Amino acid sequence: MRFADPLWFLLFVAVLVAWFLRDRFFYRSTIRFSDVASLKQIATKRTQYFSKLSLVIRLLIFLLIIIALARPQAVLIEKEVSTEGVDIMLVLDVSQSMAAEDFKPDNRLTVAKKTLLDFVQKRDTDRLGLVVFGGDAYTQCPLTSDKGVLSTYLNEVELGMAGDGTAVGMAIATALNRMKNSLSKSKVMILLTDGENNRGEIDPATASQFAKDMGIKIYTIGVGKEGGAPIPYIDPVYGKVYSSQKTYLDEDTLKTIATMTDGLYFRAFDGDGLKDIYEEINALEKTDIMTKHYRDYFDHFPTLLMWIFGLMIVEMCIRNLILVIIP
């Protein structure tokens, strides 16, 4: 709320002074009666009440006129928000080794999916996409700002859907192919794996060099406990059994990928650690938000005029229809 012409409030002083001095200067006898006994019959509490009410309404009218002249205005502020979003490609290992159950009570892939879903919900103004890889790599979801669509595709991810093996270099190349036409100033890739590169025509170092040339930062996340973990599988006779072959993580390669692209390498030993890593990445990759404020004003002058007009009618009705004026 603001007043466009506040100097009119100086009239408040004049009105208040006139109100307190009204008996001395404004009310003078115009006729004298030798006996006022007959007038007492009309000097009831009701007439005294309405007489005072009439004066109060008249004072209120003057005050509202002054307020209306001061032009009270409601300040309406509109915001125009422009964002510079981040394009983020999520690259997820779905090889059979992600079935290892060292992220109890679930396996690595299940925990990774839950953590990614939570991460996606926190990126309000960004575009995100999803690449899955095993022995092959392909785009599960292109870059999109629709979090619902991406979440649906992420929920459909299953173990082994991209073949056997771990093609880290091909996964990076596939994600780069999806980001090559991006106009965003900030482009990021988050690569999560628990193995070492053993498939694909493009090695991780070459793919990382391409990413560097394109200005794309890669955060790498290695999952799994030290010493590896046995991988469960379903035996047609014995049911669920564990393979004697363990999966091992190639940390050196993941560190090299992150270093070459000005990213960071993280290691997750359990579900809580993986969640903390995505929280840290979320904090590192802030979206630039620029806000412009536009001010508009709504004038209350017409509303006050309606109140003044209404009070004047009420005051006139009281004086002419209820009160008795003695000449």
Image (cartoon, rainbow, N blue to C red):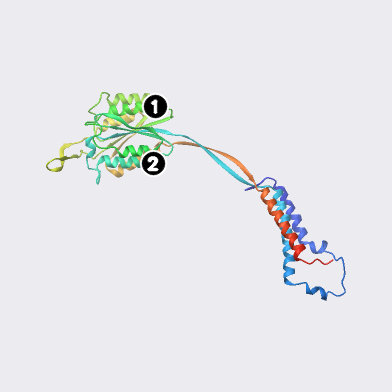
Q: Counting other residues with Cα less than 10 Å from the Cα at mark 1, is it few (<14), some (14-19), or many (20 or more)?
A: some
* Residue type highlighted by circle 2: Gln
Above or below 303: residue 160: above
Above or below 266: residue 216: above
Q: Residue at x 39, y 38 (%)?
A: 147
Q: Indicate the quadrant containing the C terminus: top left, top right, bottom left or bottom right.
A: bottom right
Indicate the quadrant where residue 277 lies: top left
In whole angstroms, how far apart are the C-alphas of marks 1 and 2? Answer: 25 Å
* Residue type highlighted by circle 1: Gly
Q: Residue at x 61, y 41 (%)?
A: 296
User: Where residue 144 sits: x, y (%)?
Assistant: 39, 34
Secondary element at tag 2: helix
Can residue 277 be seen?
no
Q: Is residue 79 left or right of residue 159?
A: right
Which residue of the protein is positioned furthest toward the front in this rendering?
321
Residue on which the image places disc 2 = 121
Residue on which the image places disc 1 = 215
Secondary element at tag 1: loop
User: Where residue 243 sits: x, y (%)?
Assistant: 15, 38
Can residue 322 be seen?
yes
Q: Is residue 228 left or right of residue 69?
A: left
User: Where residue 153 sits: x, y (%)?
Assistant: 33, 37
Above or below 206: residue 111: below
Which numbered disc, 1 or 2, marks the residue that appears first in the sequence? Answer: 2
Q: Residue at x 34, y 41 (%)?
A: 117
Q: Of residues 213 and 46, which is closer to you in this image? A: 46
Count of numbered badges drawn on the protein: 2
Q: Which label sits in the foreground, 1 or 2?
A: 2
- Mark 1 vs 2: CB contact within 8 A: no
